Amino acid sequence: MSKELEEGTEIRLDFAKLKKVAGCEEDVLPVAVQDVDSGDVLLIGYANRLALQTTLEKRIATFWSTTRNELWIKGATSGDYLEIVDIRVNCEQNSLLYRVKLKGQGACHTKGEDGFARHGCYYRTLDGPSLTFV
Amino acid sequence: MSKELEEGTEIRLDFAKLKKVAGCEEDVLPVAVQDVDSGDVLLIGYANRLALQTTLEKRIATFWSTTRNELWIKGATSGDYLEIVDIRVNCEQNSLLYRVKLKGQGACHTKGEDGFARHGCYYRTLDGPSLTFV
C-alpha cells in the first residue's frame, strides 16, 4: 500500500473498491467495527459466511480478505486482536457491526507519529484544510 | 422490504449484497455513519463521487442508492436528515465515515415499538439467544 495514500495530504479515493471486493471469490457483506471503550469506528471490513461463523465461535473479529482471498483473523500476525463484545445486524440483514475491545495496541496497520499502530483507520478528516482532492 | 427480515427472529443474511451493490450503475464506496452524540453506528451506506460532493457541499449525509440508482439525500422524504460533523477517510482511502448529528427522530426506516423511527439500523444482536440462523 502506498505511503502517499496512507500518510499524504492528497485525497485519491478508490471508488472502484466495491467492484474489486465483489470480484473476489466469496460473497461478502460489509462490517463496521466499533471499539466499545472509546466509541471509535475503527475500520470497515468484509465477512463471508465462514468469517462470521469463525467470529461467532472464537469471539475474535474475523473477516474475509478480499484481496488475498483468505480468512483473515485480525491480529493473527500483529497480535492486535479485536475481542467481540457483540455482533449486530442491520434492518435489511445486509451489513454487520462488530462491537469490540482492543486486545493489542491498535486496529490499523499504519503507525502514528509515536511509532505505534494507530487506534483506528479513520485518522484523517476529509474536509480538513490540509487535504486536497486529486 | 420484508417485515420478517426487519422484525423477525430469523437471521437470513444477504451475503450477495455487495455483488448487487457493485452491479449498480456507479462506482461506490462503503460509508459507516456514526451519531456523535450517542456514539452509535447508525447504518452503512454507499457513496459515489456525486454523493460525497453533495455531502461536502450541503453538510447533509448523502448516499448513492444502489437499488434505485439515484442520489439519496438521507431525510429528503422523512425529514430525518443527518447533519455532517465531519467526514473521515480510512488509511487505504477505500471507505468513509460520516460523523453526524440527527436532525429528526431517527436514522432507520423501520419503526420501533413506540411507533417512531428507530435511532439506528443495528437494533438486533446476532449472538442473542432469540435469533436463529436460517
Image (spheres, coloured by chain):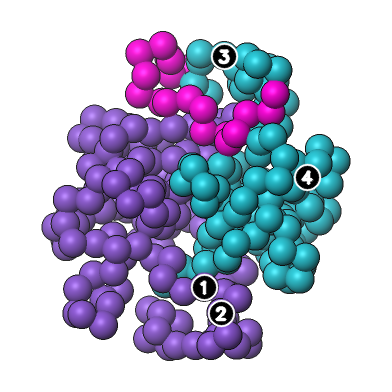
Chain colours: A purple, B cyan
Label 3: few (<14), some or many (≥20) within 10 Å?
some
Question: Which residue is disc 1 drawn over?
Answer: A125
Please name whichever residue, B97 or A49, is drawn nearer the observer in this view of the structure.
Answer: B97
Q: Please tell me whether residue B72 belongs to the stretch shown in magenta.
A: no
Q: What stretch is highlighted in magenta?
A: B116-134
Q: Residue at x 51, y 15 (%)?
A: B10
Lower position in the chain sequence, tag 3 or tag 4? 3
Q: Give the camera-side residue of B6 and B33.
A: B33
Real-space Cα separation, disc 3 to disc 2, in angstroms: 42 Å
Whether discs 3 and 1 lie on one chain: the answer is no
Helix, strand or loop at disc 2?
A: loop
Q: How far is mark 3 from mark 1, CA to CA?
A: 38 Å
For the residues labelled 4 and 1, the Cα–Cα distance comes to: 24 Å
Q: Do the residues labelled 2 and 1 touch (CB within 8 Å)?
A: yes
User: Can you tell which mark lies on residue B8?
Assistant: 3
Q: Nearer the viewer, mark 3 or mark 2?
A: 2
- Distance between mark 3 and mark 4 Cα atoms: 25 Å
Q: Name the amino acid type tagged 2.
A: Gly
Q: Distance between the residues labelled 4 and 2?
A: 25 Å
Q: Say which amino acid is labelled 3.
A: Gly
Q: Where is residue A74 in the image (x, y as percent from the top left)?
A: 26, 53
Residue type indicated by callout 1? Thr
Disc 2 crowd, CA 10 A, few/some/many (<14, 14-19, 20+): few
Location of residue B63 with respect to A16 vertically, above or below: above
Q: Which residue is drawn at 33% across and 52% down?
A: A38
Which is more toward the observer, B24 or A43? A43
Q: Mark 4 points at which residue?
A: B75
> In terms of image quadrants, where is residue A122?
bottom left
Q: Name the residue under label 2.
A: A128
Q: What residue type is labelled 4?
A: Gly
Main SS category, magenta section: loop
